Amino acid sequence: MAIRRILRIDDAEDRKILKMQCRPVKLPDRNLKQLVADMFETMHAANGVGLAAPQVGIPIQLCIIEIPAEYEERPDGSLVEVAPAEPYVLINPRIVKMSGEEVMRDEGCLSLPGWYGMVPRQTWVTVEFQDLSGKHHRLRRADGLLGWAIQHEVDHLNGILFTERIRDLSTLRDITKEREPQPAEAQG
Ligand code: ZN
């Protein structure tokens, strides 16, 4: 496995790739397993919850998401895992249904580290996608962090950046200037 370089929104050459409409993936593709493994390693190293292939310079319809494990504190102060991490590999994903109801989220992106802004998102989405073997899946009414991450990553595959979704640009700010970044904050 290898950590790959994450392209940046604020770099002119990188931005050209990030703005591309990504091409569909023909499955099965034996080369994709290595790319997916590298993307998980890259996302973990950057403390993200999602990463799209164009963010590592490959404009294809593939993204990954990992909802972090949940922990509870025991009376003795030790932590116990109450829900495991949930990894997803979404190939050729398509949002087929949306709640029609918006929620504003403070959102960040691994292609603009440290920067957050208020982005309107659907409260839930239903997404169809393929896995690495080419099998078709439907994930119904994904909400919360997962629902948000799906919308952010599918946007990447269509060349749409979170900064373009922000309605009030005064909400966009560099939080590393305010305080230490929190690892649990959502960056995709
Ligand atoms: Zn992003």
Image: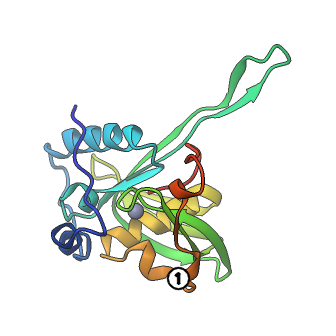
Residue 121 or 169: which is nearer the viewer?
169
Q: Residue furthest front?
A: 177
* Residue 70 horizontal side relative to residue 137, left or right: right
Position of the C terminus by quadrant: bottom left
What color scheme is it? rainbow
The image quadrant of residue 54 is bottom left
**Nearest the eye: 59 or 77:** 77
Q: Nearer the viewer, residue 109 or 115?
A: 115
Outermost bottom residue: 167
Q: Is residue 159 above or below residue 73?
A: below
In the rendered image, residue 176, in percent from the top left (x then y), is placed at 51, 54
* Residue drawn where x is 48% and y is 56% of the image: 187
Residue at mark 1: 169
Q: Residue at x 25, y 70 (%)?
A: 18
Residue under the image location 19 percent in, 46 percent down = 32
Residue 129 lies in quadrant: bottom left
**Circle 1 Cα neighbour tier, 10 Å, few/some/many (<14 / 14–19 / ≥20):** few
SS class, disc 1: helix
The image quadrant in which ligand 1 is located: bottom left
